[in-house]
Image (cartoon, rainbow, N blue to C red):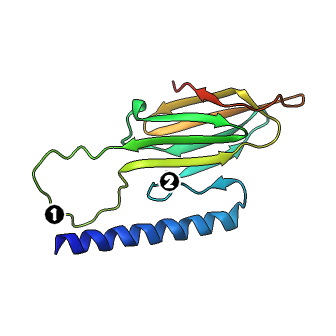
Amino acid sequence: MFKEAEGLFEELRKLHLQAERQFFSLLAPGRVHPAAEGKWQPLADIYETDEAWVIKLELAGVRKGDFALTANKGVLTIRGTRRDEFEGQWRTYHQAEINYNEFERSFSLPQGTDEGAITALYKDGLLTITIGKLSSPPPERKKITITIT
């Protein structure tokens, strides 16, 4: 019976992810890239100031060394893993809402972005990525890895 329930939960999770992708693609077509199949997507806030664009992701329970950021040809990608730290032999769930395993989230960087001036700060389960704005035409975009402080 456990295997049947596990299969049902997996199918429901896939359906939820598919519905979420469709919903967000309607809100911001071309701005948010759907995650690869089977990976969960952290929740994000995106806002703009006079000097920068800011992306804030909710990564509660993710260790700093368990995720990485890259920018490649105008797309910022956050990939990582949230690990389930349970060490017992068995458990019975009465509610299961927290996503574990691999996650991925990608965002198209707006024109006028200074990819060399991307900073990331991870504090209290929130990853804040600040993307500086250019005052002159942007240079050719290339792949970079962003250091997380």
Q: At 50% across and 42% down in the image, what residue appears? A: 79
Which residue extends farthest left?
A: 89
Q: At 79% across and 36% down in the image, what residue appears? A: 50
Q: Position of residue 71 (x, y in %)?
A: 65, 35
Q: At 44% across and 41% down in the image, what residue appears? A: 80
**Does residue 1 appear left or right of residue 74 in this picture?**
left
Q: At 89% across and 31% down in the image, what residue appears? A: 137
Q: Position of residue 47 (x, y in %)?
A: 69, 45
N-term-proximal mark, 1 vs 2? 2
Dot 2: what SS? loop
Placement of 84 over or under 144, stated as above or below:
below
Q: Quadrant where the N terminus lies?
A: bottom left
Q: Position of residue 59 (x, y in %)?
A: 45, 43
Placement of 19 over or under 35, stated as above or below:
below
Placement of 125 over or under 1, stated as above or below:
above
Q: Position of residue 60 (x, y in %)?
A: 40, 44
Which residue extends farthest right?
A: 136
**Badge 1 is on which residue?**
92
Q: Residues within 10 Å of mark 2 (few under 14, many from 20)?
A: many
- Say which quarter of the image contains residue 28: bottom right
**Does residue 125 appear left or right of residue 141 in this picture?**
left
- Say which quarter of the image contains residue 90: bottom left
**Does residue 3 appear left or right of residue 49 in this picture?**
left
At label 2, the amino acid type is Gln
- Say which quarter of the image contains residue 116: top right
At label 1, the amino acid type is Thr
Q: Residues within 10 Å of mark 1 (few under 14, many from 20)?
A: few
Spatial separation of the CA atoms under disc 1 and disc 2: 25 Å
On residue 111, the disc is none
**Badge 2 is on which residue?**
41
